[in-house]
Amino acid sequence: MKFEFIDSWKGEFIPVDSWKKLFALTAIVLVTFALTFMIVPFAQWRLHFFQLGIFMAAFVFGPWAGALTGALASSYNGLFVIANPWIIGGNALLGLFSGIFLKKFGPMKAVLAAFAIQLPYLYVTDVYLAHMPVNVVYGIIATLAVTTISAGFIASKVSPALAAKL
């Protein structure tokens, strides 16, 4: 198997115009929500891969589905677990912009561009609104870089197969 990044995206976004497609999007949102609770400890990092669902929704159903998935999936943790509601907006931005940039840049560059847009939002909200120490925020950014790129790569491989089945 040849390893390469996808540089273009040939598929069209799938409209949510049937019960089957609505069920598929709902399933992505629910699995993404479940993934927010699954943490993989690695050295001093706590890795989570819920971004996979955000990217899959954005790549298959478009930017607004990515934004909706990001916001809904992170809402419970943001509001009740870590008491940082600002992550809801950050994950919505990640889904929105990965979908917006998909056709222009391809999935991996779209993921990187969306992450680059999310970073200033994350820094400002975490440091100035959630009052987190800067060192902690830098650690979060490093962890998110690893998990976002990994999740984006997996979503770039899985999403075309899902879209083909819808």
Image (cartoon, grey):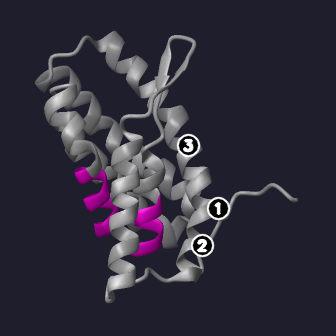
What amino acid is at disc 3? Answer: Ile
Q: Residue 43 carries which label?
A: none
**Residue at the spot 34% in from the left edge and 14% down from the top edge:** 136
Horizontal side of residue 128 vs 147, given as left or right: left
Task: Report the span colored magenta.
Answer: 56-72
Is the stretch drawn in magenta largely helix, strand or loop? Answer: helix
In the rendered image, residue 57, in percent from the top left (x then y), is placed at: 41, 64
Question: Is 40 inside the magenta-drawn segment?
Answer: no
Q: Name the residue under label 1.
A: 157
Left/right of residue 129 with respect to residue 89 in the rendered view = left
- Image coords of residue 65 (percent x, y): 31, 67
Q: Does the magenta stretch include residue 66?
A: yes
x%, y% of residue 113?
Answer: 45, 51
What element does badge 1 sit on?
helix
Q: Nearer the viewer, mark 2 or mark 3?
A: 2
Residue holding disc 3? 149
- Decide: is 73 above or below 39: below
Q: Nearer the viewer, mark 3 or mark 1?
A: 1
* Residue nearer the viewer, 141 or 30: 30
Structural crowding at the residue carrying mark 2, measured as other residues with C-alpha within 10 Å and reported as few (<14), some (14–19) or many (≥20) = some
Q: Say which mark, if any, is on residue 160.
A: 2
How far across and how far down the image is residue 131, in percent?
Answer: 15, 17
- In the image, residue 126 sits, relative to residue 119, either above or below, namely above
In front: 153, or 40?
40
